[in-house]
Image: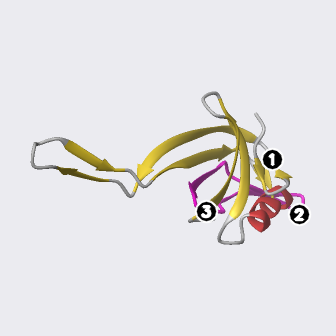
Amino acid sequence: MELYFNNLPVPKVVGFSAERKTRGSRVSYNCNGDMLVDLVARKFTLTVTLGELTAEELGAVMRETENVFFNVSFYTAAYGEVQRKFHLAEQPEQIDFSEGGRTYYKATRLVLEEL
């Protein structure tokens, strides 16, 4: 399961889901009662679950997602290889434990919205 943020292979991907949603649509009806749909765009919402990460691994992910928009590459059965720009609204960081001077972070869930 390959997933990239810019050129970084995202570490310890447990799984991800790619949902394609309609955004900016408007439904109206003409005088005959026929439904008219103004479809603006279909965009992906990508939910990524990462396993327990070291500080170095999480730091690399956070650096790649620091810009408001960044490139993401992933594979879906319906569309094959997808390469789009995404936005990460939150950058969660939860410490799991520290041992021997190293810090480990809990499994992280990232929700990305396509530009």
Mark identifier at residue 101? 2
The residue under label 3 is 88
Up/down of 92 relative to 53, above or below? below
Horizontally, residue 16 falls left or right of residue 30, namely right
Which residue corresponds to the image point at 63% horizontal and 34% vertical from the top-left? 79
Q: Position of residue 27 (x, y in %)?
A: 25, 51
Which of discs 1 and 3 lies nearer the camera? The answer is 3
Q: What number of labels is visible?
A: 3
Residue 112 seen: yes
Q: Residue at horizontal 9%, vertical 49%?
A: 31
Please, is residue 86 above or below residue 73 in the view?
below
Q: What separation in Å lies between label 3 and label 2 (alpha carbons)?
A: 30 Å
Q: Earlier in the sequence, mark 1 or mark 3?
A: 1
- Residue 37: x and y in percent read 30, 48
In the rendering, which numbered label is found on residue 11?
Answer: 1
Q: Amino acid at mark 3?
A: Leu
User: Considering only vertical position in the picture, is 108 above or below 70?
Assistant: above
Q: What range is drawn magenta here?
A: 92-115
Q: Quadrant of residue 32?
A: top left
The reply, left or right, for residue 45 in relation to residue 108 is left
- Give the foreground label among 1 and 2: 1
Task: Classify 10 Å Cα crowding around label 3: few (below 14), some (14-19), many (20 and above).
Answer: some
